[in-house]
């Protein structure tokens, strides 16, 4: 569900903010904001890696190898945030825009992307109040 909500948030925001862009331009920008590399960057910006226990096969691998996994984790966490906010699209949209989209939008629109996918980030922490009600799945270090 998280990927669908992210896509809807990004589409809605771009449509609101960039009335002068064509449908094709909006689609291209949206694709750059919701691709696995960008979602993985968002996961690292909110320090998601500190909350995740990786299986034995991924422990010690570099960030590029973990990128797809962290992108999927970000989608799941955003879906949980959406549910925690009682499926309030507006609040979920505000959370994503304020914490992540506005800081990366200039980079995407200006196409000033660097070759290094994982440079130094301005970290935006996950709100611990949101995390406190997450279910305990009884995962233990070393579980795959």
Image (spheres, rainbow, N blue to C red):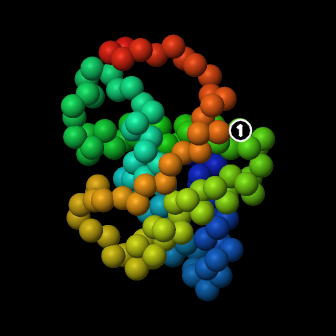
Callout 1 secondary element: helix
Residue 111 in which image quadrant: bottom left
- Residue at 27% x, 28% y is 58
Q: Does residue 40 appear left or right of residue 132 in this picture?
A: left
Observer able to see residue 28: no
- Residue at 40% x, 36% y is 50
Residue 26 in which image quadrant: bottom right
Percent position (x, y) of residue 46? 47, 48
39 lies above or below 79: below
From the image, which quarter does the C terminus lie in? top left
From the image, which quarter does the N terminus lie in? top right
47 lies above or below 94: above
Q: Does residue 54 appear left or right of residue 3 in this picture?
A: left
For label 1, the crowd category at 10 Å Cα-Cα, with few meaning under 14, some 14 to 19 and many 20 or more, is some
Residue 49 in which image quadrant: top left
- Residue at 26% x, 40% y is 65
Percent position (x, y) of residue 53? 39, 26
Q: Which residue is mark 1?
A: 84
């Amino acid at each position: 569900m998280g990927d669908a909500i992210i896509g809807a948030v990004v589409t809605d925001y771009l449509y609101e903010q960039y009335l002068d862009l064509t449908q094709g331009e909006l689609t291209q920008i949206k694709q750059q904001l919701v691709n696995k590399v960008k979602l993985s960057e968002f996961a690292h910006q909110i320090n998601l890696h500190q909350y995740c226990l990786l299986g034995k096969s991924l422990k010690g691998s570099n960030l590029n190898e973990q990128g797809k996994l962290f992108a999927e984790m970000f989608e799941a966490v955003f879906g949980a945030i959406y549910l925690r906010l009682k499926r309030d699209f507006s609040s979920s949209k505000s959370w994503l825009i304020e914490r992540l989209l506005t800081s990366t939008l200039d980079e995407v629109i200006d196409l000033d992307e660097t070759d290094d996918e994982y440079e130094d980030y301005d970290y935006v922490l996950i709100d611990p109040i949101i995390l406190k009600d997450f279910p305990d799945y009884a995962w233990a270090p070393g579980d795959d």
